């Protein structure tokens, strides 16, 4: 490492410094859709401090929420039947889409290509849009889920869909829409919020038993449960890149925080601020610094050899 550092140019050092700054500045906020007053409430990921409310005047009944790697925040609004896009840093309104394609809308997920997936229980499917243009890209999961609610993107581009009526989580290829099997069948009764952690562990919140169940996103194997005795009637769930799980507990009007590896309860966020929290989102895992540094070194080498 020291030999490489010694021979880095100022340009390369600047690139690495920027990469480190970008990686460290991404995962700072937790976003919670609050149907109580039609806003998105923002909190500091580490301290839990309240940072403000966004979306007033645009949102009426927000549910699913997701953040992409390009600093876009997507929020599903049941009343308008549309997806609203905001700047994830300052809450500025950037547009809306989905009208005419969605019969109802709950969970939202977005992949690394800025494709937005919306759980659409009104038509028993999942609808896809280009998150930057709003263009409709078709529906998947048709004929599988009876009432799709929660969505999550896995480490190998799988799309997980929780079916609250069927008590199952379905797995699809997010690119082709091909069905790839079931997860949690026989374990959950009313699966709602779901997410996948950086290690490929799929969390499924079972609203019937008020607990979070853990499964391997690759094999579907059961890995345990946590959260019993804390959340009541919760909905959305999100896991950050540090392995912390956040559960939108609308019964307690807070977000409950857990260590996703051990299941240990780590306290509440939003007490006295949240009215009816529905879904929660965190910034996706940043591009590894090693990749950014490697790319910059390769670019520098190509330019030097010209």
Image: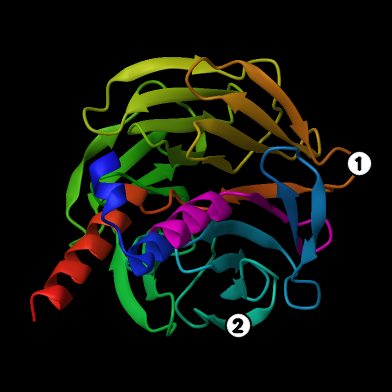
User: Which residue matches tag 1?
Assistant: 272
Q: Is the residue marked by circle 2 packed among few (<14), some (14-19), or many (20+) residues within 10 Å? A: few
Answer whether residue 32 is magenta in the image. yes
Kindly state the secondary structure of the residue where label 1 is placed: loop
In x, y percent, where is residue 105? 54, 63
Looking at the picture, how far across and down is residue 177, in whole percent?
22, 59
**Quarter location, residue 141:** bottom left
Mark 2 and mark 1 residues within 8 Å of each other at the beta carbon: no
Task: Kindly identify the residue that appears in the image at 51 percent across and 24 percent down.
Answer: 260
Outermost residue to the left: 305
Towards the viewer: 215 or 301: 301
Reading the image, the residue beneath label 2 is 94
Near mark 1 (Cα within 10 A), the count class, few <14, some 14-19 or many ≥20, is few
- Disc marking residue 144: none
Per the model, the C-alpha gap separating discs 2 and 1 is: 29 Å
Q: Is residue 76 above or below residue 284?
A: below
Q: Is residue 180 left or right of residue 220?
A: left
Region in magenta: 16-39
Residue at figure coordinates x 17%, y 55% from the top left: 178
250 relative to 244, above or below: below
Q: Is residue 217 left or right of residue 178?
A: right
Residue 163 among magenta residues: no
Between 114 and 192, the one nearer to me in the picture: 114
Task: Please say whether residue 175 is visible from this viewpoint.
Answer: no
């Amino acid at each position: 490492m020291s030999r490489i550092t010694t021979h880095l140019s100022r340009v390369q050092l600047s690139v690495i410094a920027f990469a480190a700054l970008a990686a460290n500045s991404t995962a700072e906020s937790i976003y919670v859709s609050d149907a109580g007053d039609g806003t998105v409430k923002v909190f500091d990921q580490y301290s839990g401090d309240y940072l403000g409310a966004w979306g007033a005047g645009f949102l009426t009944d927000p549910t699913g929420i997701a953040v992409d790697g390009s600093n876009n925040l997507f929020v599903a609004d049941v009343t308008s039947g549309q997806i609203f896009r905001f700047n994830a840093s300052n809450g500025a309104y950037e547009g809306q889409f989905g009208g005419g394609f969605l019969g109802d809308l709950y969970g939202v997920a977005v992949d690394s290509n800025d494709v937005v997936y919306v759980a659409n229980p009104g038509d028993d499917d999942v609808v896809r849009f280009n998150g930057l243009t709003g263009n409709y890209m078709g529906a998947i999961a048709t004929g599988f889920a009876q009432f799709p609610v929660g969505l999550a993107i896995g480490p190998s581009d799988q799309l997980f869909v929780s079916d609250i009526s069927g008590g199952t989580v379905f797995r699809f290829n997010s690119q082709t829409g091909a069905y790839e099997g079931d997860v949690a069948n026989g374990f959950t009764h009313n699966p709602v919020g779901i997410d996948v952690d950086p290690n490929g562990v799929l969390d499924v919140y079972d609203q019937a038993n008020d607990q979070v169940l853990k499964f391997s996103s690759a094999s579907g194997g059961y890995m345990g449960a946590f959260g019993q005795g804390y959340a009541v009637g919760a909905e959305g769930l999100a896991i950050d890149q540090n392995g912390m799980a956040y559960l939108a507990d609308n019964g307690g009007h807070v977000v409950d925080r857990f260590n996703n590896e051990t299941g240990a309860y780590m306290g509440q966020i939003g007490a006295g601020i949240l009215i009816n929290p529905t879904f929660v989102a965190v910034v996706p895992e940043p591009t590894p610094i090693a990749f950014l540094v490697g790319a910059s070194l390769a670019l520098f080498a190509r330019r030097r050899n010209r």
